[in-house]
């Protein structure tokens, strides 16, 4: 009997929350991983995580969400850990951010194409 592997959308919320908390704790520990470098490499950073928390719970402010992620007020974290960005880091971040927008447009286009691109048996079970 084959075990059904969950998708990201069907993954149990408790499991997803544990993984998210682990990621946040890891980033708290790795203060050497600068936000600008995370943005340049992966197109997201600690501030993005805080923004996503606010999207998930609009009752939280941006500052509150950042304090959740940083485990301290953001200005305090910046003073302790953030280094000045180099021109190279800024350029990598800009390039990476452009890819985020392209991917988002592709995702939107794909979403707009469904269910039209689904086989008729999926959109009309009587077929």
Image: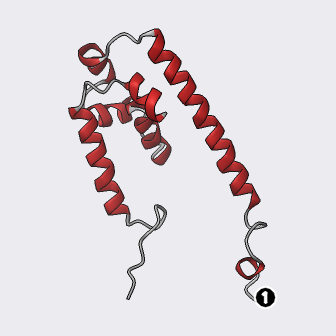
Q: Is residue 101 left or right of residue 91?
A: right
The residue that mark 1 highlights is 127
The image position of residue 126, as x and y in percent, is 77, 89
Q: Is residue 10 above or below residue 62?
A: below
**Which residue is at a point 70% across and 55% down the rendered structure image?**
110
The quadrant of the image that shows the C terminus is: bottom right
Quarter where residue 66 is shown: top left
Quarter where residue 26 is shown: top left
The image position of residue 52, as x and y in percent, is 46, 41
Does residue 59 appear in this view?
no
The image position of residue 89, as x and y in percent, is 44, 17
Q: How many marks?
A: 1
Q: Is residue 124 above or below residue 69?
A: below
Q: Is residue 87 left or right of residue 127?
A: left
Q: Is residue 113 left or right of residue 77?
A: right
Pick the front one: 14 or 109:
109
**Which residue is at a point 27% across and 21% down the rendered structure image?**
77
Pick the front one: 88 or 11:
88
The image position of residue 36, as x and y in percent, is 41, 22
Does residue 30 appear in this view?
yes
Secondary structure of residue under mark 1: loop
**Which residue is at a point 26% across and 18% down the rendered structure image?**
81
Q: Residue furthest left?
A: 29
Q: Is residue 126 above or below residue 14?
A: below
Quarter where residue 83 is shown: top left
């Amino acid at each position: 009997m084959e075990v059904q592997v969950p998708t990201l959308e069907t993954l149990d919320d408790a499991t997803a929350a544990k993984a998210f908390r682990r990621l946040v704790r890891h980033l708290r520990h790795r203060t050497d991983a600068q936000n600008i470098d995370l943005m340049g490499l992966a197109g997201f950073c600690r501030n993005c995580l805080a923004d996503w928390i606010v999207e998930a719970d609009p009752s939280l402010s941006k500052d509150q969400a950042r304090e959740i992620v940083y485990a301290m007020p953001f200005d305090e974290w910046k003073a302790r850990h953030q280094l000045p960005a180099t021109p190279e880091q800024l350029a990598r971040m800009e390039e990476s951010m452009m890819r985020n927008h392209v991917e988002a447009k592709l995702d939107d286009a794909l979403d707009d194409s469904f269910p039209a691109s689904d086989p008729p048996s999926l959109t009309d079970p009587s077929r």
